[in-house]
Image (cartoon, grey):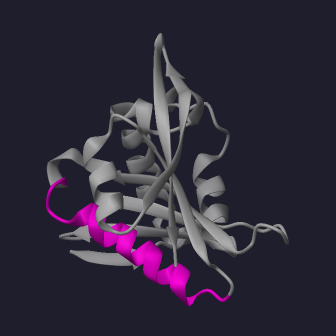
Amino acid sequence: MEIKLLTADDAATYWDLRLEALKLSPESFASSYEEAIQRTNPIERVENNLRTEGNYTFGAFIQNKLVGMVTLVRESSLKLNHRANIYAMYVRPETRGQGVGKALVNEAINKAKTIEGIEKLNLSVVSTNEAAKKLYIQLGFKVFGVEEKALKVEDTYYDEDHMVLIL
């Protein structure tokens, strides 16, 4: 397995995995598959995101195939730039349980530690996603709050646990 920082050259591959994530795990993301496929110039938007300063998207590759991703974004405002957020974590179902998620989140944590001024990482995870919560806790994250009915997918509500890692 290889973990690498994605570049604009990876935009199309990233977009394909992002669509898969939204389709297979709709309860795990604020964005929906239906909204995503309606976007104008999605690859160009991904290329721009991958070039944005303070935005780091890592990909996990097995045999040169992108099997997982995670994004680290530093807050930009003066009062919040001591923190960063972890977003868009996803690992393909067939590669789960092989350490891909752990490697990705570790890469994001390690990157955050190299950025001057970042003191903490925040993330949100669906409260019923026990595997993800176990991983985050294993890496040192702690729950600091629960948002009830954070997401609504069709007629089902999902709570989210808000978690923090103090660096």
Residue 103 on the magenta span: yes
Q: Residue furthest top?
A: 155
Q: Nearer the viewer, residue 155 or 165?
A: 165
Location of residue 55 by image quarter: bottom right
Residue in the picture at 74% in, 72% down: 81
Depicted 53 relative to depicted 144: above or below:
below
Quarter holding the N terminus?
bottom left
Residue in the picture at 64% in, 62% down: 49
Magenta span main SS: helix
Q: Position of residue 118 (x, y in %)?
A: 64, 79
Q: Residue furthest right?
A: 78
Depicted 136 relative to depicted 64: above or below:
above
Residue in the picture at 47% in, 51% down: 15
Q: Position of residue 138 (x, y in %)?
A: 29, 65
Q: Nearer the viewer, residue 48 or 84?
A: 84
- Visible in this render: residue 77? yes
- Visible in this render: residue 65? no
Residue 161 on the magenta span: no
Q: Is residue 27 left or right of residue 113?
A: left
Q: Position of residue 24 (x, y in %)?
A: 33, 33
Q: Which residues are magenta?
A: 96-116
Q: Position of residue 52 (x, y in %)?
A: 69, 70
Depicted 166 relative to depicted 156: above or below:
below
